[in-house]
Amino acid sequence: MARNKTYPDFDAAVADIPDGAVIAIGGFAGPGTPYNLIAALARRGAKRLTCIANTTGGAHKPRMPDIGMLVENGQVAKVICSFTAATRASDVLPFTKYYESGEVEAEIVPQGTLAERLRAAGAGIPAFYTPTAVGTELAEGRETREINGRRYLLEYALPVDFAFIRAARADAVGNLRFHRSQRNFNPLMAMAAKTTIVEVEEDILPAGAIDADDVHTMGLVVHRLIRVPPPPMGLWTRKREAAR
Amino acid sequence: MARNKTYPDFDAAVADIPDGAVIAIGGFAGPGTPYNLIAALARRGAKRLTCIANTTGGAHKPRMPDIGMLVENGQVAKVICSFTAATRASDVLPFTKYYESGEVEAEIVPQGTLAERLRAAGAGIPAFYTPTAVGTELAEGRETREINGRRYLLEYALPVDFAFIRAARADAVGNLRFHRSQRNFNPLMAMAAKTTIVEVEEDILPAGAIDADDVHTMGLVVHRLIRVPPPPMGLWTRKREAAR
Amino acid sequence: MSWTRMQMAERLVREFQDGWVVNLGVGMPTMIADVPMGDRDIIFHAENGVIGYGAVCAPGTEDLNLVNAGGQNVVLNPGASIVHHADSFALIRGGRMDVTVMGAYEVAANGDFANWKLKGAKGGGIGGAMDLAASAQRVFIMLEHRTRDGASRLLPRCSLPITAAGVVTLVVTDLGLFAPSGEGFALRDLAPGVTLEEVRAATACPIIA
Amino acid sequence: MSWTRMQMAERLVREFQDGWVVNLGVGMPTMIADVPMGDRDIIFHAENGVIGYGAVCAPGTEDLNLVNAGGQNVVLNPGASIVHHADSFALIRGGRMDVTVMGAYEVAANGDFANWKLKGAKGGGIGGAMDLAASAQRVFIMLEHRTRDGASRLLPRCSLPITAAGVVTLVVTDLGLFAPSGEGFALRDLAPGVTLEEVRAATACPIIA
């Protein structure tokens, strides 16, 4: 009596996300970004969210659904990410003005620390030490420790209520495959989350169609699957040029 | 000018292992155990070794090369593993009498903590907290910390000089694939080690023959490859019955 | 009359709920993968990173590179996946195991249990037991009610070094099914033909019936 | 005369040794993957888990799901592999990067550099820079020698919040190649047509030649 993990559409898959939820959103510079789920969350309208992602969204056009849009929509209380502004002074992120005005809180975290804090949450590790950011403004007033002659910063796990991720392929029990740099944060966020929601680029396969040795993210940590329909209903389904 | 990572035989691959080295040895109950490299290390005769593995070897016959054999050979100063004795009182591990007599030191570590300490070493994480072993004899006199109302034990990374691992498949740059439960500790030990030595069950493939999405252990952390020859020269090359 | 080991396994399996992820320890618990689950979808996880395995292989059909935590060659069910040891124990510590079933030398009324070190031994065998015991949602223990010498394995407090403190949810023995209740064990079920008096006589602490 | 950005990239590449694993930051450093490496085997690592990528794709040949750290569609070289973010930064913190090449706003004689936060800004953009700076074997910095206003970007101490302390190995600018030496910068190479006097005039701390 395997539970059916397939959802009919994006709205149904995010319908129970409450105000105040902690949402992790995969993706790095496009690949692996769950645009359709972000758009559904904007329609759902849940408020006071904490959003965890590498960035709040880019400065580029045409704009795709991003955390900046949820911020503009008044849904976000806090973001945790490795960029709160673009590195290039001339690029202005939509998010930045809300942060500077104090409307939205932000915690800026080095990218590797962000990845490791998510990984720790998924691995039942409540805290760890890292060399990253020692001696910088980010470490001011925080706990450090010398181990074998080097100084390290204490960092805490980052648990997640809902992970939004995008995968190339899934089977019915939720085993996932990512294509190329689509992988990025997605497997970590699935591990860190109580509920993982996946937009899938290909038709969902029967259980066993992905060999056990070829699974990138195990179905054990995947709860909801939605097949991305063709555009314009499904966002960012452009044909990939390179062979799988 | 890619370096050639292929070695002609097991003896050449372990010829530079010095006395006092820290050796991690993959495998769990047979699958993924680098029997040929262990046998080569016994021939090499390096002494005062620290050996890290899940077990020192089983009580079963016929006996395969294991840490117990290196201990009997007078090569081992210390073992770090999750078993120093069998759980069944009637099974007597060859290793146990050397430990009980004090000839060899042992550090017994819960299996998940062992895996995580190796992972931490490979990930540049010097220490982490874990719930495992809190309230047991293993935590006596050691540092614990309460985080969000639960008590955790501080554990340190376990860096490795040489990892001995066994894989099903490799390409020339050292990308690896494991078959089924052959994977176990092997990827972690490769990450944790300064030098990773791999016995490979199939002919070594040209670079690119393993798709980038299908690599289990990246060649970046793999240094030496040896093709396992047919028995009796190569140990445990019995045909696998199930399909790949 | 009392339960055989297979009957003990079957009795525990009745407690499993649809959709559970179940980790089976070495020894007696490995029998559980052979018990029919009816229409319940149960996923077996082995500490060596095998998720979704099934029964022990028929002779001659083994994949020698596929073993469960007890080193037995098993089959993979459709939808199985394989991960390395760090990810396998990430799932364990991350609370993804609905239950772990383990053997033990002793189990105590306060929920402690002991299964890694024998009396007077210098070393022991922990394996994944401490990780599983610390972080699984439930810990089910399978053990003979008495030692070969007739001493109770259900105790007020463990005499051996413990594996984890206060974690045991259910205990199945050849005599019955029990839940640690602090001062004693609450009786949840009796093996057929076994009387409450026999259980009380065999047990070194109160049985609450 | 001075070096163009491509010439700066080429000059840095001359420092690469056969077999190095090289991480390239966003901006100017991405050009390095397009510089011919001769008979040296160089492996490029991108923070998003791409190991062994090559040049930027010719238009129309892109795999839209394959980008480098700067979001450019690149090719994979034979032997490439893909890992997730935690493994990618495990390699970084684990010391597997022989060098990281990054852009910066400022670099200091004491080996500090700053590239994540502008003066007066509330937030910033760290990305993987702090992880890379803390743990790569070497940190090479590429930057224009002067700001648009003509102020030196090579300073005795950084005025902006730093990315990491005391880690910079080499600095290439349009004027030359330098190594932080504590009190100033040791001149390692001059761009063609640039004089030592010009470099000294453009730099806010001593140039040791």
Image (tube, coloured by chain):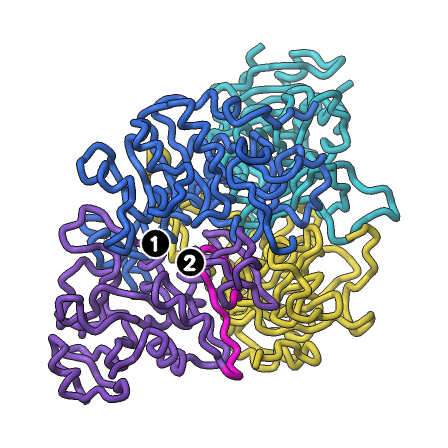
Chain colours: A yellow, B blue, C purple, D cyan
Tag 2's secondary structure? loop
**From the viewer's perspective, is residue C166 above or below residue D18?**
below
Q: Which mark is residue C69?
A: 2
**Relative to the observer, which residue lies in front, A42 or B188?**
B188
Name the residue beneath numbered marker 1: C127
Indicate the chain on which mark 2 is placed: C
A79 lies left or right of B86: right
Residue drawn at point x = 58 percent, y = 78 percent: A2
**Magenta residues, start to end:** C38-54
**From the viewer's perspective, is residue B109 above or below residue C128?**
above
Tag 1's secondary structure? loop
Residue drawn at point x = 60 percent, y = 63 percent: A25
**Relative to the observer, which residue lies in front, C6 or C114?**
C6
Evaluate if marks 1 and 2 touch, with contact meaning CB atoms under 8 Å apart: yes
Q: How far apart are marks 1 and 2 (CA)?
A: 9 Å
**From the viewer's perspective, is residue B85 above or below residue D177?**
below
Residue B72: x, y in percent?
A: 30, 31
C39 lies left or right of B125: right
Q: Give the amino acid type for the residue marked by disc 1 in the picture.
A: Gly
The part of the image, by quadrant, that contains residue A14 is bottom right
A59 lies left or right of B100: right
Q: Earlier in the sequence, mark 1 or mark 2?
A: 2
Image quarter where the N terminus of chain B lies is: top right
Determine if residue C97 is in view.
yes
